Image (cartoon, helix red, strand yellow):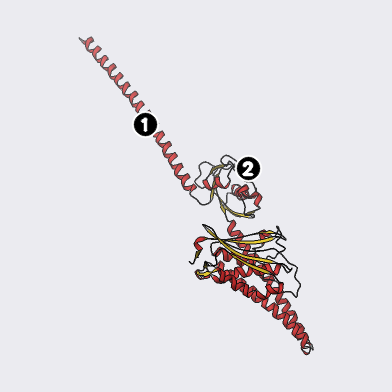
Amino acid sequence: MTDHLAIIATFGVIVGFVIHTFRIRALKRECAKLVVEIGKKSENDLRQAQDERNHLLDALGDAFLIVDSDANIRFANAIARNLFSGRELVGRPVREAFLDPRLAEALLQCLETGEPVQQRVVLPQQTSPLGDLETRGINAWNIDAAQLTDSRGSKPHTRVVIRDVTSEYQLDQIRKDFVANASHELRTPLAIITGYLENLLDEGMLEDPEMAKRFLSVMKKHAERISLIVEDMLVISRLESGEASAINIEPFKIHSCIKDVLERLESVIQNQKAIVSVNLQQDNLIMQGDRFYWTQVLFNLIENALKQNLHKDLRIEVGAEETDKFVRIWVSDNGVGIPSADLPHIFRRFYRVEKHHSQMEIKGTGLGLSIVKRAIEAHHGTITVASTPGRETKFLMTLPKAEVSIVL
């Protein structure tokens, strides 16, 4: 009986052990399954977090890079990938990714010192990050580099922000050039006026009425030149101010505007024996714009054609035509033309194609074509110029049809 009970007890222990073993194995399987599920969830969470981070960084308006301590690019957002279009970024050293080593200098300085670095880099068109897509000439970029303080490991990563500041740089250069050129243009007539005043003050000079009259005549011309420069500068300033009052939009007949301009220039046209023709598709074409500025636009273009072509047989045409979407207005002449080297620059302030003027000759302000361009742009239009010397020079202005209407 005792042996029987012992056997039963032993069997019970064995059965309990087996059951316990199966439970342990099942628990292990459940734990392993749970570990796999936790791992997958962690991977998914990490992937989701990375996707959210990438979406946020892609939404930035500037190029954003993450660079490791060996100066290899580990991440580039959408703007950076577009900026360096056609070149692989991730995994490449920054010196290989950037065409111009000056772009990498700020970043490398940050990697070396560990201190934040901000630097403006001005590049020629050939080495712009945009590569062949760069059409703006000189381009400028702000490089902002700083180490990430929460980077894992002993060697932190560095974030780099590259911002395109070409527009601001070019505008600043225009302002500097404008101030320098304006100072020069005003200094010349002032120096002439001062010189003639000193001569007039010499003893006995006023006793010669003819000489004094000639001096005063020259001084008057140069004083008028200063007045013209100041007026033109004020016009440009007003056009670029962005003020609502700068442009007064009202309907007016383009034919009437052209007629007024030709009447103002009638004496010059007759003296040069030039022929000016008006070619309008419709005489009742109505412009929606500021007549004051359109008068200045046409006056400057026609006067330029007259001043630059003093030879006989000069023919000038002023015309306008309407298309489905645009109205085009042009001023053309058959004069000496504009050299191809000068064409890209003629709308710059104070730029002159012909620079051979005597001291006694009152040249233009050099602001006329700049005013023309700004006035056209203020009316949401564009102006282009094409020139074949000796045959035709044509200034073509294109405006949205919404800016014009026809009076029936």
* Image position, residue 145 (x, y; %): 56, 50
* Image position, residue 124 (x, y; %): 66, 53
Q: Nearer the viewer, residue 182 or 328?
A: 328
Which of the 4 quarters of the picture holds residue 28? top left
Mark with earlier residue (2, 1): 1
Q: Is residue 136 above or below residue 198?
A: above
Q: Amino acid at mark 2?
A: Glu
What residue is rendered at 59% in x and 72% in y? 259
* Image position, residue 281 (x, y; %): 56, 63
What residue is rendered at 64% in x and 46% in y? 99
Answer yes or no: is residue 319 visible.
yes
Residue at the far bottom: name it.
207
- The local secondary structure at tag 1 comes to helix
Residue occupied by mark 1: 34
Residue occupied by mark 2: 96
Cα–Cα span, label 2 and label 1: 46 Å
**Image disc number at residue 100:** none
Q: Amino acid at mark 1?
A: Leu
Q: Nearer the viewer, residue 237 or 270?
A: 270
Q: Nearer the viewer, residue 312 or 400?
A: 312
Answer yes or no: is residue 367 visible.
no
Which of the 4 quarters of the picture holds residue 225? bottom right
* Image position, residue 261 (x, y; %): 61, 72
Q: Is residue 172 above or below residue 234?
A: above
- The local secondary structure at tag 2 comes to helix
Q: Is residue 296 above or below residue 93?
A: below
Q: Is residue 231 above or below residue 389?
A: below
Q: Nearer the viewer, residue 258 or 221?
A: 258
